[in-house]
Image: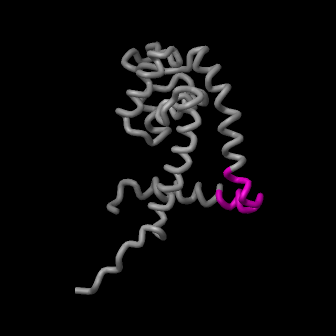
Amino acid sequence: MAKQTPLKLDSFLPYRISVLANTISTTLAGAYSQRFDLRIPEWRVLATLGGYPDSSAREVAQRTAMDKVAVSRAVSSLMERGRVVSSIDTLDRRRTLLRLSPDGEALLARIVPLAHAYESRLLETLTRQERLQLETLLEKLMQQASMNSSKEV
């Protein structure tokens, strides 16, 4: 049997992307936790509902690629603190719709400029062309990963 090449994590793309994403999330989480008493899942739910009001928890989980349990806990926490409200869908009474409360909207309005500033600082190391390339490459990789999600690894 042929000797298997060892997996070198430092050059393995999925590992590198995961480490980058975790580093960015941890940095944001630290800032949002201290200033706004938010954890990463709560921030993601807030941001998602800010862009997609009247979403179900299932839809939030799909959009964020978060576990349903994490979304459920984040939604519960945000509702307890009056940042998210729910209502029953009039077209499908089995479906609960989530949206930001006025307090949630005000909180998100305070966070968005900080998020944009962080993103700008992160991307300032790249040229305009590199940023465009990065966007194109991320879209291609996301499409490829989505197409292959049902196939064996």
Q: In this view, does 132 lie above or below 53?
A: below
Q: Which residue does the image show at 46% across and 13% down from the upper left?
A: 87
User: Does residue 66 appear left or right of residue 127 in this picture?
Assistant: left
Which quadrant holds residue 66? Answer: top left
Q: In which quarter of the image is the C terminus?
A: bottom left
Q: Which of 123 and 71 is in front in this view?
A: 123
Which quadrant holds residue 132? Answer: bottom right
- Residue 12 point in image, percent of width and height: 45, 68
- Residue 126 point in image, percent of width and height: 72, 59
Q: In this view, does 109 lie above or below 87?
A: below
87 magenta-colored = no
Q: Nearer the viewer, residue 31 or 81?
A: 31
Report the span colored magenta. Answer: 122-134
Q: In this view, does 95 lie above or below 3?
A: above
Q: Residue furthest bottom?
A: 2
Q: Which residue does the image show at 36% across and 18% down from the upper left?
A: 94
